[in-house]
Amino acid sequence: MRPQHSDSPEESARRFDVALFIVHPTVDPAEITAGLGLEPIVTHPVGERRRTPKGDLLPGQYRDTRWRHRVRYEVKHQYFADAITALVDRLEPYKAFLSKLRSTGGEASIIIQFLGDGYFGDKIAKETLSKLAELDLDFAIECFSVPQR
């Protein structure tokens, strides 16, 4: 059982992101968006000219499709597991779609990103971990030591 926590005003806000990140050798990002009913924050279609985050052209083309959906959370406590569970539960009806992505050469991960705002600590329930495996999703963690925008 999770300890009780307060969202008291004296605690500073901490941010984290929970994301679904998909890499696939051929699929169009619009197909991923339609197949999952989630809006991406960034897409890079296979074969398209590479660009910087600001939109400047880079040499070469993307070798695969990259698609990322993200939800940002701002909290005044250390806990994050419920946000992961919420996204995994949201994806359960799309198990066949995620399995097809994997079977055709793609990868999909749930990523928790700690944005450098302070301490986080939590546990992800075995039920959520089991659902991740059933959905063919990997789990990734990204931690920033310097606060991110």
Image (cartoon, rainbow, N blue to C red):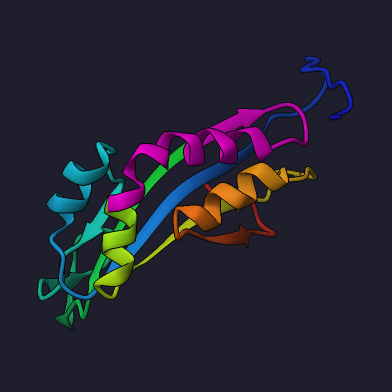
Write the start and end of the magenta stretch as one range: 72-96
**Viewer-side residue, 102 vs 30:** 102
Residue 133 forms part of the magenta stretch? no
**Which residue is found at the position 21% from the left and 51% from the top?**
32
Q: Is residue 130 visible?
A: yes
Q: Is residue 73 above or below residue 144?
A: above
**Which residue is found at the position 42% from the left and 51% from the top?**
20
**Which residue is found at the position 26% from the left and 67% from the top?**
52
Tally the numbered discs: 0
Name the quadrant containing residue 60.
bottom left
Place of residue 35 in the rendered image (x, y in percent of width and height, measured from the top left): 21, 45
Q: Is residue 88 above or below residue 100?
A: above
**Viewer-side residue, 62 vs 123:** 123
Give the quarter of the figure containing the N terminus: top right
User: Could you tell me what secondary structure mostly forms the magenta stretch?
Assistant: helix
Residue 95 shown left or right of residue 47 in the figure: right
